[in-house]
Amino acid sequence: MVDYGGVRFEGDDGGLFGPAEIEHFLRTEHERARRYKYPVVCSVLSIDRLDQLQDLYGYEARETIVKSVVRVVRAAMRDSDLLGRLAGDRLLVLWSHTNKETGALLAKRLLAAVKRQSFDLDGRMLKVTASVGVSHNGAEDAHSFDTLVAVAEEGLLVAQKAGGDRHVETELYRLHESRRRGVEAVPAPIPAALVAPAGPARPRPSLSDELVERDLKIELLERRVAKLMAMLDVSEEELRRVRSARQVDVGVPSIYREVQGLSSDEAQHERKREMMRTIFEANLALRSKAKEGGAVGDGDGAGA
Amino acid sequence: MTIPDAKDKGVLYLGIDLGTSRTSVAASNGVRETVASYVGYAKDPVALKKLGKETLYGDEAIANRLSLKLYRPLAHGVIQADSDPEGNMRAAIDLIKEIIRRARPKADELVYAVIGAPAQASIKNKQAILDAARSTVNSVMLCSEPFSVAYGLDMLDDVLVVDIGAGTTDMCRMHGTMPEDADQITNTFAGDHVDAKLAELIKANCPGADFSKEMVKAIKEKHASVLDEMPRALVKLPVMGKPTEFDLTEQVKAACRSIVPPIIDGIQQLVASFDPEFQERLKGRVLLAGGGSQIKGLDHEVERQMHERLGSGRVIRIEEPVYGGANGALKLAHDMPAEYWEQLK
């Protein structure tokens, strides 16, 4: 193990930083960018339908695909960029000195490069696609590293749910920043003098003291409610904006880029081929009958 | 539909199971969807304004049926031609288009679909189904529904598939080649028959109780069982507007059991006409599929009656009754050679 600036490189993850390591470097880089005012783009990448591919072709195939995609992503990076692996075989990339527009272009190139990969699995040629969520520190409310990552992860989720093979920047910086502040902003505690002051035991507070204490508590709660209401307004406004910008469903790409057919490795290959031929001929006959404009009889066997 | 000419744009395979009660699709983009086989059209402009759209499908159509002209276009496994044949045909076409749309095909991909049709659908019905699909996909084929179930499970030899749907129970024996007419039997003792029987028994045993067909179906789907020791089926039905509890355990059991003897008759017929050398093997590989296979204890009951009447039997229930047919059709689509798809474009 090597201790490098407080970060321990504990495992060989194909040469990638692990989640703890990448977080350390990202926070450092984000702070540096904030101090020296240069743009950075954060993106989270995931391979589409990876679990489904594993179900079909096994764990080894999954690892092959992930390693190949990592190679593709790494090849597209500069020395100053950071690449790390997150849970669930997701990749986190930080592009330094990169603005929003360039970040979008880089994301598109990554997606295209992933799509160009071919995998020979069980005699079938497969191609995969990926989804990318993107965020940048140039947005007005992108103050913190946590907000950047949250927006990028949210964009990834939206891209995946929309069918994959795309990059998305949700721009919900204000929402996440508000949430982050809402968690951090703990209401101020009740002044100690009103709770239990140190020193010898006081005589029981008078009724007016108790009323003042209760009023203070109420005031604190009211402030908390107002803060939560403000956060709710922000959330609703962002949701309205996202809904209005929602695009028409462009569909979900298939895992197959070519027509498959029976593999010659398939068990019972010849018998299945014969069955395919019978089904095809029955459908051909059905179409001929339709063109002729008549039905010769009912029932047509199991071919069709 | 515009056919993309670049091969590397992708190929989407669809396996579609057209059922009386449910229509399902399994696609090679990972999408799997199922919808109740109901289509409803807004009755009038008021309904259209209330619903916000002209056509509704599945559970949404059932929930809004009072505002709709509702069709169940695939009753008994074929497009209905009794009353309003044009309306049923239109509904069937719309249903097929809707289930393909729900598979979320990309505009720039080839779409090849295999549709599992009931074993004994007429040629006219098959052509109607193909015509409906052709407007939305590049190439489409039909195959027998019980055959697609067996193909999906790679069980091509000495297997007897019993596909219990809503409208029909299809039985098909597999013997290593494409099944022929003689290998298939269809009867109408299926889910709808259970509903009708249950409604009859409720009417006879629950005087004054009000209920609809949908309520009976819901009771069946919640409590369906043929087990001697089934959990009690306590159901509230309105009597003169007041919800009243009834114990329908025996009625549900009797209604579900009513489909077993015809199933055994069908199995017996298929076994008896099979090569005697392989009859024992066939009896030992009975596959229960379709929505009706979810009746609790049905597999054991069929097995028990097979032992009584045929001397032996082993019944296996498939794991995914809703998607079994669609999964098998998808596998068929995937295995079909490219040249066959091309010729049927």
Image (cartoon, coloured by chain):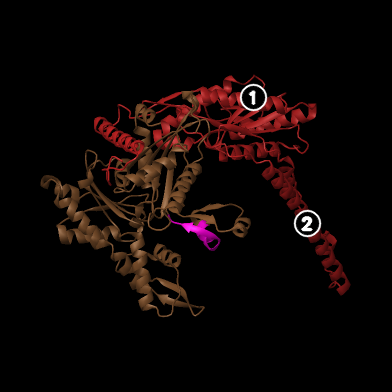
Q: Amino acid at mark 2?
A: Arg
Viewer-closest of B230 and A256: A256
Residue position marked by numbered label 1 in the rendering:
A106
Local secondary structure at mark 1: helix
Q: Is residue B193 left or right of residue A146?
A: left
Magenta stretch in the rendered image: B61-72
Q: What is the x, y in percent for residue A128?
A: 49, 29
> Is A176 or B207 nearer to us in this picture?
B207
Residue A69: x %, y % from top left = 52, 26
Give residue A224's mark.
2
Observer-nearest of B71 and B143: B71
Residue A144: which quarter of the image? Answer: top right
Do dots 2 and 1 share one subunit? yes
State whether residue A109 appears in this view: yes
The reply to whether the magenta stretch includes residue B220 is no
What crowding class fits label 1: few (fewer than 14 Cα within 10 Å), some (14-19), or many (20 or more)? some
* Residue B200, picture quadrant: bottom left
Rendered red, the chain in question is: A
Task: Tell me the quadrant of the picture where the C terminus of chain B can be found.
Answer: top left
Amino acid type at mark 1:
Leu
Chain given the colour brown: B
Q: Position of residue B107 (x, y in %)?
A: 53, 33
Q: Is residue A29 above or below residue B190?
A: above
